[in-house]
Image (cartoon, rainbow, N blue to C red):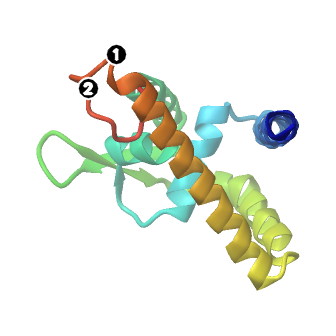
Amino acid sequence: MQEEKTGDCLWEYNNILKENENIYRDLARKLGLSVCQFWILYTLRTESLPLSQKDICTSLYLPKQTINSALKKMESEGYLALTSGKDHRSKDIMLTSKGILLCERTVDQIIAMERSAFADLSEEKQEFFLSLFRQYTNLLKTHMHETFRSERNDRKYENTII
């Protein structure tokens, strides 16, 4: 009986997660951005600057090539500038004035809506939601690592499951 209940909850959780992802996918399309471009701009507006390509890959859990393609396109369109980074191998990603204007009419509005929706929850519910979601994510990673560790002993487990 417990497994059946867990299965129903898992289905609902996955359904909510997919619905949430779909909200952002639809928003990106309505704003004239690819999903990757949307999340890059979002990250540049919500993280401490300066950020390198590696920082963005780490933050978004996306492959370097995916981020690189989106960055090159956004740079060629005049939304981003790549400047010398912390070392000779990295470049910092900075918004141009055109990029800032793009953010103001796109991701900044989404961030404001997110903050408003989150603020509609009591502070206690906000903390509880984040605590449970973090706990579930950590447990899921633990179970994934335990399952795949025996198959791939030589691989480090950081931000990936296998």
- Check if mark 1's residue and mark 2's residue have beta carbons within 8 Å: no
Q: Nearer the viewer, residue 41 or 155?
A: 155
Which residue in the rendered view is the most extreme toward the top? Answer: 151
Residue at 51% across / 50% down in the picture?
138
**Does residue 48 appear in this view?**
yes
Residue 91 against residue 26 in the figure, above or below = below
Residue 70 against residue 125 in the figure, above or below = above
- Amino acid marked by disc 2: Arg
Q: Can you tell which quarter of the image residue 110 is in?
A: bottom right
Distance from disc 1 to disc 2, alpha carbons, whole Å, reads: 10 Å
Residue at label 1? 151
Q: Nearer the viewer, residue 160 or 85?
A: 160
- Amino acid marked by disc 1: Glu
SS at circle 2:
loop
Which residue in the rendered view is the most extreme toward the front? Answer: 1
- Residue 155, labelled with which disc? 2
Residue 108 against residue 68 in the figure, above or below = below
SS at circle 1:
loop
- Left/right placement of residue 36 relative to residue 110 reads left
